[in-house]
Image: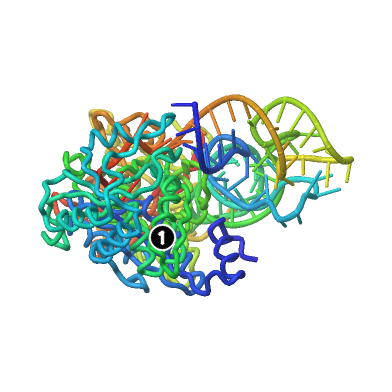
Amino acid sequence: MDTNTNFIIDIIEDDLKNGRHTHVHTRFPPEPNGCLHIGSAKAIWINWSTAKRYHGTFNLRFDDTNPVKEDDSFVRSIEEDLSWLIGGLPNGGIFYGSDYFEKCYEFALKLIDQGDAFVCDLTAEEMKEHRGTLTQVGKESPYRNRSIAENRDLFERMRAGEFPDGAKTLRAKIDMSAPNMNMRDPAIYRIVRAHHHRQGDKWCIYPLYDYAHPIQDALERITHSLCSIEFENHRPLYDWVVQKIGFDFPPHQYEFARLNVTHTVMSKRYLRELVETGVVSGWDDPRMPTLSGLRRRGYTPSALFDFIQRAGVAKNYSLVDIRLLEHCMREELGRTALRRVAIYQPIKVRIANYPADKTEMFSLPNNPEDANAGTRAVPFSQCLWIDAADFMEDAPNKFFRLKPDGEVRLMGAYIIRCTEVVKRSDGSIEELICTADLETGNGMPTDGRKVKGTIHWLSADAAVDATLRLFDNLFTLENLGDMPADKNYGDYLNPDSLQVFDNAKIEPALQDAAVGERFQFVRNGYFCKDVDSTTEKPVFNRIVALKDTFKL
RNA sequence: UGGGGUGUAGCCAAGUCGGUAAGGCACCAGACUUUGACUCUGGCAUUCGUAGGUUCGAGUCCUGCCACCCCAGCCA
């Protein structure tokens, strides 16, 4: 049984069963006024995966009806991010709402001819006064009863550019006393002289969302128009437009709750502010919850979709724990990422009973969870690096790593015992003198004694310097002015959440890794190779830490 | 306040014609382990916002109440 269902799937199953539809056609309709983020990924996933499930069609459609906010650069970035996410182009194609402007205009004429729309001369303020309030009905516009001929003439002249910006609107004639504010004779066309990123200066009147969107859906033969819950109040207007124009294949709108994630800012406005004020290096800064940021950070589309699917599709307001995302990412990377060694804060270890001029190779598995991943040869020599976190001078019993006179396994190699702690004059550790159990090699002790701890290591001769960057949260910054302390925006004020290790040591082979390759740095987490945007040097971004159950 | 939507564990979320609360994350305990990872095993809602009602039986039906979200752009 397929347990991966939701209420939208139920609706579609029902439509298919009852013959209301024989084919499923969905769409993702972003406005090109910003970059896609993890919240957009939910809308993409719902529309795309639903179409896919029924071997249907999925369109990408730019909802570009507001020329003042939109930009071609966002069109390109959205195309790129969407293709990355769904692994290719949408099978239905890529469309632009603005390409239907001529159709929208013709339909507006039709509404006028039917007596369902009128040209209104009220100013924005006057219209607001006339609209009434939540508890008070609105007043009808004095221009509401103009003749069809006059409305037609005026609307044609609006298009022709005879009136200044904002001087007139075309309004749907519905009901000024409707309890749903959206039905109180909403404006469906406005006059704006602005350069459109795609249509240029061809138009000076632009249709509004509530009018344009159902037309776009209908023209593309969308069967199920899936959008987020704040449009629920708009559905009666959506249906009104579809019905008045009289489409043969009327689309229907269904709503789902948007995605909120703990510690993560999801508002385009604030993301834009971060970019514009230079708090982050750009929309694709690896701390950003944008798709480009997540991609750079090392997140995979499959983990993102797995997360969205597991979080579920419903209508409740929800704030999903980011640890679910991290779990999904770990689960995938645990299976697929190659194991490598990286050491954040190196401490030198000298094996006193190991020849200074000797180097031997130990074979370590590339992924113990995947035998097909093979092994790699790692050099071992007298001087090694281990991580500062793996040594403690006054260690409690439960500390299973290296301590004075204690034994520990060097992963895949010898068991060593720390015999001496050499310190500098300032008290810091210069090096640890150890002896290795050379007889047992990388096997078990012959006398049956237990060595509980295993630590990772690197030959000091072979190790390479590297920069490692650790992000605690997807998105962090020090200060963002008036950002509201609302649960929607998460607890983003975490100045300690970016740690940079500039003197980390890594395996030599990692130098040649390609940007975008993902690794598990043993015991330290999953990392993705990246290039620092300012220094242009290779860095490793931590995608997600390993689960830490370290207890003393 | 008028309208619309939603309330099931710390966080998400299934719950079909009313039949005796899925699953995941998180957490806790234990086993295993040459990554304190992974894996495995066990635990984790006498109760579904709340108060009543109908019924042999209610998360599911009825009534009242409460809480939260959305709507008064010529934004989407």
Tell me which chain the residue with mark 1 is part of: A
Q: In this rendering, does residue A135 appear at all?
A: yes
Question: x and y percent of residue A104 in the render?
Answer: 28, 62
For residue A460, say whether it is visible: no
Quarter placement of the N terminus of chain A: bottom right
Identify which residue, A171 or A277, lies in the foreground: A171
**Residue A377 rendering spot, x and y as whole percentages:** 36, 67
Look at 35% across and 62% down and name the residue there: A215
Tell me if residue A290 comes above or below residue A23 in the rendering. Answer: above
Residue depicted at 29% across the width and 59% down the height: A108
Q: Amino acid at mark 1?
A: Val
Coloring applied to the structure: rainbow
- Say left or right for A224 vs B10: left
Q: Whole-percent x and y of residue A9?
A: 55, 61
Left or right placement of residue A203 versus residue A21 in this view: left
Q: Quadrant of residue A303?
A: bottom left
Q: Quadrant of residue A362?
A: bottom left
Closer-to-camera residue (B57/A245): A245
Task: Name the spot of residue A243 as percent of width and height, x first.
Answer: 43, 60
Please report the residue visible at 14 percent of the width from the left and 46 percent of the height from the top: A165
Who is closer to the viewer here, A94 or B37? Answer: A94
SS label for mark 1:
helix
For the point 42% across and 72% down, the residue is A57
Q: Which residue is mark 1?
A: A242
Front-lying residue, A529 or A158: A158
